[in-house]
Image: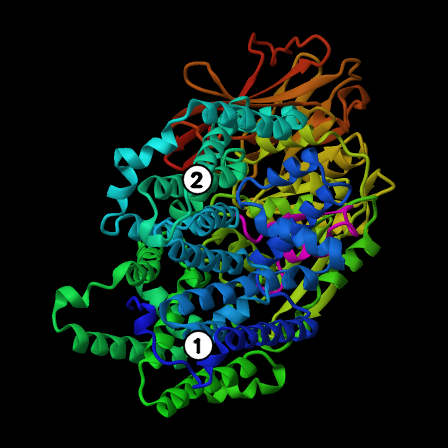
């Protein structure tokens, strides 16, 4: 890359150009712009599936901006729009709102807003090329840049990166034409473009900084600007400072007085107006200094004028950019986290970006041509200079263009969290200029013309092959550009078969049971993701809420959130989400585990086959809403249940719809079962079959009863004769019960062969432990047989206690016989009563010997009944010896 003066410019192409001047090149440039705008409209008309989440995000954001401004444009609405986003600057979205107001609201209108930026892009590239080597080089540069695949591809999407590339090119063009800030008009336009560029995207500064530094550090520039005579007009004149202070105050008051409450709620609070006043005061003072100087020619501009132009342009850039950066200074934290703080770590991007330049930005065609151009330019320049010192003396323009490419490439490649091809798109204009300059050095004219034609015609063929579906087969036969941004309008990745989002929303709207509904999204495809749903639902389906489940990061419980949704959309087969392992694991679990809590609570209501062989499954809740206990009660119950639940446990929930309130706290490892009841009394046929099956399969059964929604009065009596209750706790209106299934005993142990009698006429005829060995955390099941010698007027409770050697109570179970279904007041003399008791051994039971005690006490007074004729109020059934992970039941001699 080198600087050309007018004398060094190559002869015009074609020969008649000298007489035509710039009129013909500019006319052809207008035709070039019209060509691209027409093709973009045709592409948009054929396109139905928008590929990618970010461009959908910007579409949704543009609707939010439009909603703010469509009712009226005034200081308050402008301030609200300007400060709406705490991450992205607002210029592109505000531009789209103008298009909406003029042409209506649609994705096509939003994307065609890029037309403004495309025209600016072409004019800027043309302007730089014209400055370097004449109008035909400018035209060739613009044509080549427009045929770079990522340029014409990105001009069809609402990505802010295309506007960024456009503003960067405009900014550098104005910088070079300012002649080192000696031209006031170009200097101030440069400052304005810098500020506007920063309002497009924060990375603008990375592309604009190096060319600016080249200009500022050029020989004599800083010396001329900063010497005392040059600074005196800028810093002197108190009356101008007073005028600037008053004008700055007026601008600040007009902007902030209608927005006081909104401003104080922002991070800088009351400091925001003060900083704005300072910024505009300095800017206005420097603008006054700039306009007070003499114009003059570039070679005779006084140093004071250059200083005024420089400082005025920079101050203008700061004040324009500060309109968003001061108000939303909190963007820094999120920006830093995304750029350098992703949990997946940071990476080098040098080789990936070179690959992107070859495959996607330039294509193999133009990458090869660029390499030839750079070699040719280097060879040509070496022949002219014959020394490294002169070879590297590229001048201000040359080094500005070189560093325009090199500096951002290094910054974006150095240990960043995300490497994405579109991030370096703004470095492409200098590459087009290099090719055009190399072609312009060819002699004779016919060879130069042939070379230009050979450069453009294959590019046009590639443009057509990458723009029209009918030419898609060429992509398979030729080495054309490829990448995420290179897309046909309605083939391959943009096939219309992916356009299922509207039907999903319509189905959810028709099937919802309430005024609102929540749709959980376990799909994050480029064609179908949360942003697509957000855009299609905006306004029309505002009563449908979305839960973005597929894109949550590490450490986030995805599974439980499914139960907060009324509908769930799942992609099949499971995708690979390396940065979102929980989401991937949840999808895989749902698709490979049909007997799962989720499948017991949701049914597939619709399937969507996709063109790439995948499919989407739309699930809906199986059970209707009920008047359940408060969600806070379920949260407390879950906090008590989940820490003590163990593998092999099962949780039965009644009524069935309570499963959505409780399972949201789980991770899928603990199975929940909705229990149907017959008229709310006892389990119906399906419910009874479920409990019988769990009695065979589960180690322990937890039962949750929401007594506010369904008293379930018949459930506990039904379970009393089929299981061993070990725990009964209440959490508000929620009852949490723990049972050991009857199952099969693993070698029962007779704990009381001779029986025992109590003074109240009750005698124990049999006490069997259904297992001799078990583990801490399990439930010791006891079968007890009672008999009464006479009527029992008092209600007695049976207690089973596990007592440590020091007398401490390690576990207990107190209940009326058979869980209250056979109270002692109803016993008949001589009747045999079969009772069951479950004793829950603590999971952290310390090694040692424990006494297993059995006794009776008056349920009303708590007074214990003595055993036999002695003074003891309990009967030692056995010793429980804990050794390691085994609790062994040892019978006592004499029992």
Disc 2 target residue: 290
Disc 1 target residue: 136
Q: Residue 498's spot in the image, x, y percent?
A: 66, 69
For the residue pair 741 and 168, the one nearer the viewer reads as 168
- Residue found at x 46% / y 68%: 126
Residue 266: give its label.
Answer: none
Q: Quadrant of residue 8?
A: bottom left
Residue 415 vs residue 879: left or right?
A: left
Above or below residue 755? Residue 410 is below
Q: Nearer the viewer, mark 2 or mark 1?
A: 2
Q: Residue 372's spot in the image, x, y percent?
A: 30, 80
Q: Is residue 415 visible?
A: no
Start and end of the magenta stretch? 526-552
For the residue pair 361 and 166, the one nearer the viewer reads as 166
- Residue found at x 35% / y 59%: 404
Dot 2: what SS?
helix
Q: Quadrant of residue 435?
A: bottom left
For the residue pair 537 and 59, the one nearer the viewer reads as 59
Q: Residue 123's spot in the image, x, y percent?
A: 51, 65
- Residue found at x 46% / y 25%: 241
């Amino acid at each position: 890359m080198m600087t050309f003066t007018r004398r060094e410019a190559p002869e015009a192409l074609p020969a008649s150009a000298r007489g035509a001047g710039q009129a013909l090149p500019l006319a052809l440039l207008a035709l070039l712009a019209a060509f691209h705008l027409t093709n973009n409209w045709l592409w948009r008309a054929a396109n139905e599936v928008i590929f990618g989440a970010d461009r959908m995000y910007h579409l949704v954001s543009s609707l939010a901006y439009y909603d703010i401004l469509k009712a009226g444009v005034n200081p308050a609405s402008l301030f609200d729009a300007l400060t709406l986003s705490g991450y992205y600057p607002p210029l592109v979205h505000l531009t789209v709102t103008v298009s909406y107001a003029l042409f209506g609201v649609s994705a096509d209108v939003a994307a065609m807003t890029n037309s403004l930026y495309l025209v600016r892009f072409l004019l800027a590239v043309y302007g730089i090329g014209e400055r370097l080597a004449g109008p035909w080089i400018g035209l060739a540069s613009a044509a080549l840049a427009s045929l770079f695949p990522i340029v014409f591809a990105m001009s069809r999407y609402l990505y802010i990166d295309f506007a960024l590339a456009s503003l960067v090119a405009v900014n550098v063009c104005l910088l070079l034409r300012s002649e080192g800030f000696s031209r006031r008009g170009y200097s101030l336009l440069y400052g304005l473009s810098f500020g506007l560029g920063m309002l497009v995207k924060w990375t603008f500064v990375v592309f604009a900084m190096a060319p600016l530094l080249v200009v500022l550090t050029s020989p004599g520039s800083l010396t001329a600007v900063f010497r005392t005579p040059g600074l005196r007009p800028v810093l002197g004149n108190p009356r101008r400072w007073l005028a600037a202070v008053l004008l700055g105050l007026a601008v600040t008051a007009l902007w902030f007085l209608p927005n006081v409450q909104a401003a104080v709620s922002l991070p800088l609070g009351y400091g925001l107006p003060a900083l704005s006043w300072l910024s505009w005061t300095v800017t206005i003072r420097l603008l006054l200094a700039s306009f007070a100087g003499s114009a003059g020619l570039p070679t005779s501009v006084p140093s004071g004028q250059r200083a005024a132009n420089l400082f005025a342009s920079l101050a203008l850039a700061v004040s324009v950019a500060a309109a968003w950066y001061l108000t939303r200074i909190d963007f820094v934290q999120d920006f830093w986290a995304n750029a350098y703080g992703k949990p997946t770590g940071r990476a080098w991007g040098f080789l990936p970006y070179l690959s992107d330049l070859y495959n996607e930005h330039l294509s193999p065609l133009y990458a090869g041509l660029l390499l030839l151009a750079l070699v040719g330019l280097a060879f040509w320049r070496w022949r002219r200079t014959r020394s490294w010192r002169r070879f590297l003396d590229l001048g201000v323009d040359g080094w500005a263009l070189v560093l325009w490419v090199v500096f951002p490439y290094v910054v974006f490649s150095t240990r960043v969290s995300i490497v994405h091809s579109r991030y370096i798109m703004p470095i492409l204009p200098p590459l087009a200029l290099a090719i055009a300059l190399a072609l312009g050095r060819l002699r004779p004219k016919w060879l130069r013309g042939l070379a230009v034609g050979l450069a453009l015609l294959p590019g046009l063929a590639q443009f057509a092959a990458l723009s029209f579906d009918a030419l898609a087969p060429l992509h398979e036969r030729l080495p054309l550009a490829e990448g995420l941004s290179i897309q046909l309008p309605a083939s391959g990745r943009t096939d219309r078969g992916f356009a299922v989002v509207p039907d999903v929303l319509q189905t959810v709207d028709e099937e919802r049971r309430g005024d609102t509904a929540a749709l959980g999204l376990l799909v994050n495809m480029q064609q179908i993701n949360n942003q697509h749903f957000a855009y299609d639902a905006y306004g029309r389906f505002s009563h449908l809420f979305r839960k973005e489940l597929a894109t949550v990061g590490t450490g986030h419980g995805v599974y439980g959130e499914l139960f907060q949704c009324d509908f769930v959309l799942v992609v099949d087969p499971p995708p690979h989400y390396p940065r979102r392992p929980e989401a991937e694991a949840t999808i895989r679990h749902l698709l490979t585990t049909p007997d799962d809590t989720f499948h017991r609570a949701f049914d597939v209501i619709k399937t969507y086959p996709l063109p790439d062989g995948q499919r989407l499954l739309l699930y809906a809740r199986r059970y209707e809403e009920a008047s359940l206990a408060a969600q806070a009660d379920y949260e407390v119950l879950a906090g008590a249940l989940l820490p003590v639940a163990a593998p092999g446990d099962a949780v039965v929930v009644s009524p069935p719809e309570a499963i959505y309130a409780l399972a949201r706290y789980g991770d899928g490892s603990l199975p929940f079962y909705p229990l149907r009841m017959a008229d709310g009394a006892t389990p119906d046929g399906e419910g009874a079959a479920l409990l019988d099956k769990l009695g065979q399969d589960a180690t322990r059964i937890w039962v949750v009863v929401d007594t506010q929604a369904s008293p379930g009065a018949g459930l506990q009596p039904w379970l009393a004769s089929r299981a061993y209750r070990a725990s009964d706790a209440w959490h508000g209106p929620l009852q949490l019960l723990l049972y050991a299934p009857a199952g099969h005993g693993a070698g029962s142990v007779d704990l009381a062969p001779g029986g025992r009698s109590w003074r109240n006429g009750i005698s124990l005829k049999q006490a069997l432990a259904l297992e001799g060995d078990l583990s801490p955390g399990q439930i010791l099941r006891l079968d007890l047989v009672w008999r009464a010698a006479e009527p029992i007027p008092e209600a007695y409770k049976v207690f089973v206690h596990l007592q440590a050697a020091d007398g401490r109570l390690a576990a207990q179970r107190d209940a009326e016989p058979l869980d209250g279904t056979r109270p002692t007041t109803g016993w008949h003399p001589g009747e045999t009563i079969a009772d069951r008791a479950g004793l829950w051994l603590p999971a952290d039971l310390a090694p040692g010997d424990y006494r297993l005690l059995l006794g009776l006490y008056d349920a009303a007074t708590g007074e214990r009944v003595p055993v036999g004729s002695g003074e003891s109020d309990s009967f030692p059934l056995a010793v429980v010896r804990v050794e390691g992970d085994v609790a062994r039941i040892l019978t006592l001699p004499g029992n």
